[in-house]
Image (cartoon, rainbow, N blue to C red):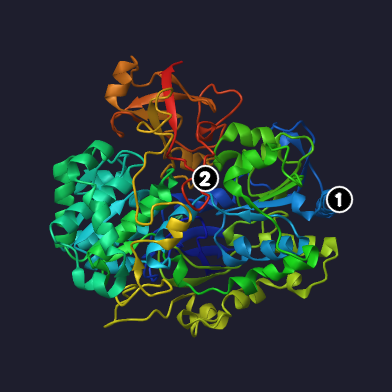
Amino acid sequence: MKQVVHTVCPHDCPDACSVLVTVEDGKAIRVAGNARHPVTRGFLCGKVAKYLERVYSPERLLYPMRRVAPKGTGGAAAFARISWDEALDEVAGRLKRASEEFGPESILPYSYGGTLGQVQGNGMDRRFFHRLGASQLERTICSEAGEVGLLSVTGAKWGVAPEDYVHARYILAWGANIHGNNIHLWPFIEEARRNGAKLVVIDPFRTRTANAADWHLPVRPGTDVALALGLMHVIVGEQLHDAEFLAQHATGFDEVRKRAAAYPPERVEAITGIAAGDIVRLAREYVESQPAVIRLNYGVQRSENGATAVRAISMLPVITGAWRRRGGGMTLSTSGTFGLNKRALQRPELMTTALGRPARSLNMSLLGKLLTDSSLTPPVKVLFVYACNPAAVCPNQNLVLEGLRRDDLYTVVHEQFLTDTTDYADLVLPATTFLEHKDLVTSYGHHYVQLSEAAIEPLGECCSNAELFRLLAARMGFDESCLQATDEEMIDAVLSGGEAVLSGITQPALEREHWMRLRLPLTDGAYLPFADGFATPGGKAQLASAAFAARGLDPVAEWSAPAESRQGEQASSFPLELLARKHDNFLNSTFCNLPGHQKMERRGELQMNQADARTRCIADGDLLRVFNSRGELRLRARVDGSVGPGVVAAHLDWSRGGAEESSPARNVNALTSDRLGDMGGGPTFYSVLVEVEKA
Ligand code: SF4
């Protein structure tokens, strides 16, 4: 008998799609986007449309396995099957031994966006590691710098609803490849364009979104701060700013006026590569075509000055008063809207049971350093990886692998497949996909809370994240009842904060409705996040930030060249700026291993400008050595003009999938830097210099 089950895609994507799974005789036979969902609107991206290939892949991990070959050896032959009893005993024993010998902070949990579900990605794991007294993980690898920059101006991660993009008349996609990783915004943009809106893309790479836009401005990597200040120069200089909105809702405008005066278009052209005339035209069009909305994405903040860049860009809709109008303003993330009770979900007070104090925090972006730093006290002795593939996604891959190779490091990985990271795991535990467990999913691109039901039983001996940590808590002898809470109890906990936006949004209601829109405050039927003030302590947008000043940063925003950039201090040895990009049809390192997804991407290539290829006598298709002081890769030249002169681009992939003749296997992170950005502790994937030669 067939039935249709409501699930939600929890992958690291702003769209958080409502996914209908058709199940027959216990087997999922079809996945489809829910046509009734206001944002999903009946379709899925190319990644998840083929999801059953992932769920039923012959490569799925189906039972626990222990390493029987040297670390660094991958493939099923490197492991031997064991029972769950053996696996749990071994992990619990290792955790106890490390705690006794080195203290519980010698244990480092390591997870990120493998699932964004509240229960399976943010819940029982946190309770368990808090109770254990393990080191806390600063989850900085993706969005932290952007969050700092945005909050410094607006005070909250709120943004324009995707449905309201239809009202915009000017849409500025700034570092946002909407086609690649926010595809459910596209129909709203197309509707706006049918109504006369213009789509402008600011991006150093000619993305699919840039190809489809009305105007593409290929800004030099890491120069977005200067471009934003140049736009302010024109807007303020020509008296196009919204003086009334600024007087009512912002502080620091005089400081901005003075700063912007130092960024005339000619100077900004020299920094950004965007012609002065285009800067003037862009500024005028942006102000005069209201409502105007900026879709900012997280690429911009992955430079050394990334938080400052987001801060500067966030000032634009304040200065122009774009927030006044439906369809005007900016979206970086909507995640701050949801009012979740994270304390009830994660129970941070459990840390004091083990330690009598909060555990230390370690920055995930520095994994290589953390694992190889002999002065770290206590050293990391147990690494517990779940919902993440750090051997592939962390910067400075050679240092990360050096750390993972340590014989005295015990590494556990809870995963759906053998990955770059399991090549270094002592123990591998099989994980469920979202079709096999229950969860509550929010979003960073829309305003719907959704319940994701389990559509099928776990395959083989796969275990959900929440269940794994319940089992481990019992093995460790932890007797707090919250460590045995059911998934349903965890969902009730995270919805329990009493926030007005969650009023009436309960588990029984979600079981009926499947998704519910947040109870957002409306003005004439529209959600206008900052039309009547901002979420800062004083209620005003902070165009001059005391917090930035206290950290030694410019209180407004000032462009400075990333040290690792063509205009920076390290320009001489490696003259090309590398964009370490994501494939449109993979999601970070997820999906890279599936044949159906691989067919949709060109892999193992370095995209170059014709001028840079010519000076190096490189032709399309040549095998290249791409290198810097951190590592090297072999990639095939693709001389296609996707990037401007002085810039090259390569994609993130699994180490064994992307690069050619690269031994030992490496991916683009062999070249990226673990230097941190200006604020937020995030990595600088887009401040990377390399040189290229024929191999
Ligand atoms: S990855 Fe994004 S677009 Fe694709 S199904 Fe999941 S939420 Fe939707």
Nearer the observer, 164 or 129: 129
Amino acid residing under circle 2: Phe
The x, y position of residue 194, in whole percent, is 17, 60
* Mark 2–mark 1 distance (CA, rounded to whole Å): 36 Å
Report the residue that reaches farthest toward the bottom.
504
Q: Residue at x 33, y 67 (%)?
A: 160
Q: Measured along the vertical axis of the image, is residue 221 above or below residue 491?
A: above
Q: Is residue 446 above or below residue 612?
A: below
Residue 482 circle label = none
Neighbours of disc 1 within 10 Å: few (<14), some (14-19), many (20+): some
Residue position for label 2: 591
Residue type at tag 1: Arg
* 525 or 570: nearer the viewer: 570
* Picture coordinates of residue 544, whole percent (x, y): 35, 61
Pointer 2 or 1: first along the chain: 1
Please state which of the two labelled residues, at mark 2 or mark 1, is closer to the viewer: 1
Q: In this rendered view, identify the residue nearer to me: 533 or 137.
A: 533
Look at the numbered disc 1 and say if its residue's Cβ is closer than 8 Å to ligand 1: no
Left or right: residue 103 versus residue 581 is: right
Secondary element type, mark 1: helix
Measuring 75% from the left and 69% from the top, which residue is drawn there? 483
Q: Which residue is mark 1?
A: 97
Q: In which quadrant will I find the N terminus?
A: bottom right
Residue 524 visible at all: yes
